[in-house]
Image: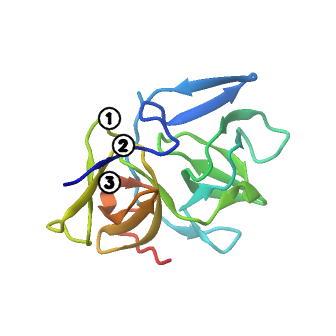
Amino acid sequence: MARSISGARIPLRFAARLVLCGMVLFVGLSNTALPVAAQGTTTGATGLPVPRFVSLKSDRVNVRVGPSRDHDIAWTFVQSGLPVEIIQEFENWRRIRDWEGKQGWVFHSLLSGRRTALVTPWEKRDLTPLRARSRSDADIVAELQPFVLTSVTECAGGWCRVNGENYDGWLDQTRLFGVYPDEIVED
C-alpha cells in the first residue's frame, strides 16, 4: 500500500516566500512553469555549463535585480535546498530562474552544487508515484504530493533516484523541477 508524502517544510499551497519591506508575503501558485530543457548549453566563466541546476545553500537568500550588492533586492528566498537554474554568470554573481520562471541575481556563495528537486510544482493535486525501481511497472512505495522538496542522488534513462525523510525511490524524471529531461546525474 502506497502512502502519501507531503512537502517537509514547504506548504502545499505556497511555492515561494518573499520578504519585502520587512513583511513576509506568501505568493500562491497561480503562475506555473514547466521544466525547460537545457537548450544551447554553453560554458560560463566558472568553466561549468550554463544553464545548470543548483540549490540554495542558506535559509535566507536575497535575489537582486542586478549583479551587485548595490542593486535592489527583488525578493528573498527563505527556504534552503530549493532548486534554481543558473542561466548566466557575471563575476561572482549568478543569474537564476526559479520554478515559476522568475529571474534575478544571487551571490555565488549562497548556492550549492547539491542536487535537489521539487515534485510537480506546476500541478495542484496530482500525486506522483514513487517506485521501488526505475521502471514504470515497478511497485509503488509512496505517492508524493506537489511541492515535495527532495534530494536527487542519480538520474538515468528518464528516472531519478530521490530521497527525503521517510522515503527513498525512483521518480519519472519529467515530474521534477531541478533536473532536465533525460539529464544524467551521478552522485
Name the spot of residue 9 as percent of width and height, x first: 52, 42
**Whether residue 179 can be seen here:** no
Q: Nearer the viewer, residue 35 or 147?
A: 147
Check if mark 1's residue and mark 2's residue have beta carbons within 8 Å.
yes
Which residue is labeled 2 in the image? 146
How far is disc 2 from disc 3 in space, using C-alphas?
9 Å
- Is residue 140 rendered to the left or right of residue 35? left
Q: Alpha-carbon distance for marks 3 and 1?
A: 13 Å
Q: Earlier in the sequence, mark 1 or mark 2?
A: 1
State if disc 3 and disc 2 touch (CB < 8 Å): no
Identify the residue position indicated by label 3 in the image.
175
The picture places residue 56, in percent across and down from the top left corner, at: 63, 53
- Amino acid at dot 1: Lys
Q: Which residue is mark 1?
A: 124
Q: Residue at x 70, y 71 (%)?
A: 46
Residue at x-position 40% and y-position 64%? 162
Contact, CB < 8 Å: mark 3 with mark 1?
A: no
The residue lying toward the viewer, choosing from 69 and 168, is: 168
* x and y percentages locating residue 106 in the rendered image: 71, 49
Viewer-side label of 2, 3 = 2
Question: Residue 129, position in %: x, y?
Answer: 25, 55
